[in-house]
Image (spheres, rainbow, N blue to C red):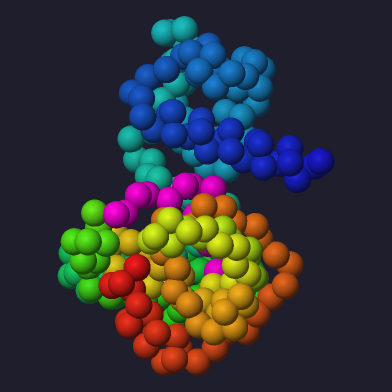
Amino acid sequence: MARTADGTRLNRLEELKGLLREREHATAAELAAEMGVSLRTLNRDIALLRQNGLPIDADRGRGGGMQLHRSWSLGRLHLDHLETIDLLLSITIAEKVGSPLLLQHLTSIKRKVSATFAEGYQGRIRDLRRRIIVGAPATLNVVNSYVPPSRANLALISQAFFEQRQVIIDYEAGDGVVTSRRIEPQFLYFNAPVWYLITWDHLRDDIRTFRVDRIRSAELQQTTFRIGDPKIYIAAADRSASLL
């Protein structure tokens, strides 16, 4: 229960920092009303932010208005588990695309994001980055049949991929037939804008590639798996991705 309360406060503090950053001036009453909290709670949060070094100026002459000092920058960003994974995936894609415009600060960003994980996860972060393959853009036929996948499925698949856990999916093939599969999401394969899972498929007892946007439902399992030979999985993905 205490963890939930701490998480709620942390999210509220981040929201408050965002509101202060957006505005040149806002009264305490305006901020409290927008955030849906009492004036007492808001003042307590303001005091906590100041204790943590956030330079909040107050102007008593204009109804208790507040603003961030102009010298303030973004400061520490708090991300949850899945948000951090998404950011790492984005950084890896930017690196593998190889655009000089995107690579100027990626090394320092990558180091700081990875540092948010406990020490025991550092090896997993390195392994995760090796499991993301960026290929050529999708063919026109693939793009024409592409529908953005649901956020719920994406979140669950990202978690299964990072934690190396099996997942049961209902998958709709190109001909409309839906089958239930227990899969091990070994590698992610990106043919912009389409994501593929390169998996070990327990139904077929073989390597199979699945388009993420064709996964209709997903259920995370407790069973974990080991990573197979990258060369075998990637070769299978190269053969099948353009056909899915």
Closer-to-camera residue (182/23) = 182
**Residue 164, image x, y percentages:** 61, 73
**Residue 27, image x, y percentages:** 46, 14
User: Which quarter of the figure is the N terminus placed in?
Assistant: top right
User: Residue at point 52% right, 76% down?
Assistant: 199
The answer to whether one can see residue 124 in this image is: no
**Residue 123, image x, y percentages:** 57, 81
User: Residue at point 37% right, 19% down?
Assistant: 25
User: Which quarter of the figure is the C terminus placed in?
Assistant: bottom left
Closer-to-camera residue (235/126) = 235
Q: Is residue 121 left or right of residue 28?
A: right
Q: Is residue 102 left or right of residue 209?
A: left
Closer-to-camera residue (55/207) = 207
Which quadrant of the figure has residue 234?
bottom left
The residues colored magenta run 145-161
From this viewpoint, which residue is outermost toward the right? 1
SS assignment for the magenta stretch, majority: helix
168 to 136, vertically: above or below: above
